[in-house]
C-alpha cells in the first residue's frame, strides 16, 4: 500500500537517527517492581512520585459518564472532585478533564484572544505548545527559565500572559518564583501547569501554593503524585464557567469516568492526610540519599533527575545495559527533548528504598564509560 511504503521509509529514517519508539511490555506491577518483556526489574522512570498508584481503593461508581457533561454526563463524583480540587488549589472553582493534554489543548485556545500576547517558556510541554498554536494570541518564546519583559504593552483590551510549567518535566528544574510574583504584581495573567509539582508539598499543595504564588489559571494532573488519572484547571468561578462552555475538548468529549472521579476523591483523602505526609517525607529522604550517592552538589529540587548524555544511540544503549542489570530507566530523545540533549530521565518515588537507589547508582557507574561518569556529579539542575 502507498501509505505503508511511505511510513516504512520514515520509520527507517527514525531508526538511522536512533529515534524509533516502542512500548515497553510491562506486566505484574507491584509498586516499583514489575516485569518488562518478562524480565523482573525495579523501575526508576514512573511519575508515581508518592507511590500512591496502588493505594486507591476500588469504587462502585459507573465506569462511564455516558455523554458529555454538558448533555447528561455531569454526575455527583465529578462535582465533588472539582470542589475538593478547587479548595486544595486555593481557587473558587475547578474543571476536571480526562487528561492533561486534553486540558491544555482545550483551555488555552478558549481563554486567549487575538489582542493578547503570550510569553511561553521554551521548554514547555508539547500539550502547552499545541494549545497555544490553536489559539489566536501573539506568541513569544522565552529562553528557558527567563521572565517576560515587564514593560511590554498590549492594546485593545488585550492581556499579557506568562505561560509556564512549575517543575519542568524533563529537566526537573523550576520556574523563577520571584519573577513570577513580580509579573503578577505588574498585571500579567499567569497560566501555570503544575503537573510535576501538584501534591508534593505540605498538605498536598502544589508548587505555586507552597511558594506564595496564585496563578490566574492553575493546572494540575492527577496521574503523578495522586497516582490516579486525569487533570484539572482551577481559577475563578467566572473563568471555570467559561471553560465549561467554550473549551472544545471539554464540550465535545464524554465526561471523565465517574469511577475515576470517585478514585480522585479517595486519592485526595490520602494525599492530604497522614499517608501523603509520610510519603512526602520518604520522597525527600530518597532525594537526599540519591544526591549523596551521585555526589551531586545539592539535593534535587524535584523527583525528576536527568542524566544528559547527548547522543541518541548512546542513551538507548545505556538504558538497555541498565535493563540487563534489572533497572528500568527510560532513554528520552528528541522531540521530547532538544536535539543533542538525549538523556536518561531518573524519577524517584516514595516507594523506592535506599538500597534500591544504591543499586541503581552502582549499575550506572558500571555501565557508563569513564568519560560519561562525569555526568553523575553534576546532573541535577
Image (cartoon, helix red, strand yellow):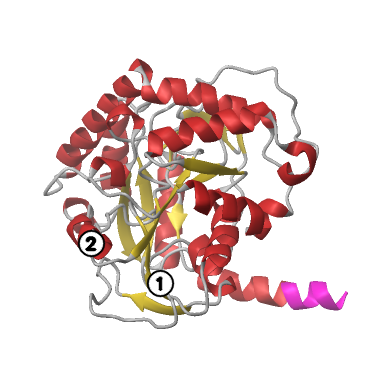
- Judging depth in this view, the residue of 301 and 127 nearest the camera is 127
Judged from the image, the secondary structure of the residue bearing numbered disc 2 is helix
The reply to whether the C-beta atoms of the residues labelled 1 and 2 are less than 8 Å apart is: no
What residue is shown with label 1? Answer: 159
Q: Is residue 41 visible?
A: no
Q: Is residue 58 visible?
A: yes
**Horizontally, is 252 left or right of 49 in the view?**
right
Quadrant of the rendered image containing residue 46: top left
The number of callouts visible is 2
| Magenta stretch bounds | 1-7
Asked if residue 35 is positioned above or below residue 373 in the image, the reply reads: above
> Is residue 3 a member of the stretch shown in magenta?
yes
Residue at 56% in and 58% down: 107
What residue is shown with label 2? Answer: 185
Residue 103: percent from left, percent from top: 57, 53
Asked if residue 333 is positioned above or below residue 141 in the image, the reply reads: above
Amino acid at each position: 500500500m502507498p501509505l505503508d511504503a511511505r511510513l516504512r521509509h520514515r520509520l527507517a529514517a527514525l531508526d538511522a537517527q536512533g529515534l524509533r519508539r516502542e512500548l515497553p511490555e510491562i506486566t505484574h506491577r507491584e509498586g516499583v517492581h514489575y516485569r518488562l518483556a518478562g524480565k523482573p526489574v525495579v523501575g526508576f522512570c514512573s511519575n508515581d512520585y508518592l507511590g500512591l498508584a496502588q493505594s486507591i481503593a476500588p469504587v462502585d461508581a459507573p465506569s462511564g459518564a455516558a455523554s458529555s457533561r454538558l448533555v447528561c454526563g455531569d454526575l455527583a463524583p465529578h462535582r465533588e472532585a472539582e470542589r475538593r480540587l478547587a479548595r486544595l488549589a486555593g481557587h473558587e472553582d475547578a474543571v476536571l478533564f480526562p487528561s492533561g493534554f486534553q486540558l491544555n489543548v482545550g483551555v488555552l485556545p478558549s481563554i486567549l484572544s487575538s489582542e493578547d500576547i503570550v510569553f511561553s517558556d521554551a521548554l514547555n510541554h508539547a500539550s502547552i505548545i499545541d494549545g497555544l498554536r490553536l489559539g489566536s494570541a501573539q506568541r513569544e518564546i522565552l529562553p528557558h527559565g527567563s521572565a517576560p519583559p515587564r514593560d511590554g504593552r498590549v492594546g485593545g483590551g488585550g492581556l499579557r500572559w506568562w505561560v509556564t510549567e512549575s517543575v519542568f518535566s524533563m529537566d526537573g528544574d523550576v520556574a523563577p518564583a520571584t519573577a513570577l510574583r513580580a509579573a503578577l504584581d505588574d498585571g500579567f495573567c499567569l497560566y501555570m501547569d503544575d503537573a510535576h509539582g501538584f501534591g508534593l508539598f505540605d498538605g498536598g499543595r502544589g508548587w505555586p501554593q507552597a511558594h506564595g504564588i496564585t496563578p490566574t489559571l492553575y493546572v494540575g494532573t492527577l496521574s503523578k503524585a495522586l497516582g490516579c488519572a486525569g487533570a484539572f484547571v482551577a481559577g475563578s468561578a467566572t473563568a471555570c464557567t467559561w471553560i465549561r462552555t467554550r473549551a472544545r475538548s471539554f464540550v465535545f468529549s464524554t465526561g471523565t469516568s465517574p469511577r475515576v472521579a470517585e478514585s480522585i476523591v479517595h486519592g485526595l483523602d490520602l494525599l492530604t492526610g497522614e499517608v501523603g505526609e509520610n510519603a512526602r517525607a520518604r520522597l525527600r529522604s530518597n532525594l537526599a540519599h540519591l544526591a549523596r550517592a551521585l555526589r551531586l552538589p545539592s539535593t534535587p529540587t524535584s523527583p525528576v533527575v536527568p542524566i544528559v548524555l547527548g547522543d541518541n544511540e548512546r542513551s538507548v544503549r545505556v538504558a538497555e545495559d541498565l535493563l540487563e542489570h534489572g533497572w528500568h530507566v527510560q532513554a528520552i530523545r528528541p522531540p521530547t527533548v532538544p536535539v543533542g540533549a538525549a538523556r536518561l530521565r531518573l524519577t524517584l518515588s516514595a516507594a523506592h528504598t535506599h538500597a534500591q537507589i544504591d543499586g541503581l547508582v552502582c549499575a550506572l557507574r558500571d555501565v557508563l564509560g569513564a568519560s560519561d561518569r562525569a555526568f553523575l556529579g553534576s546532573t541535577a539542575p
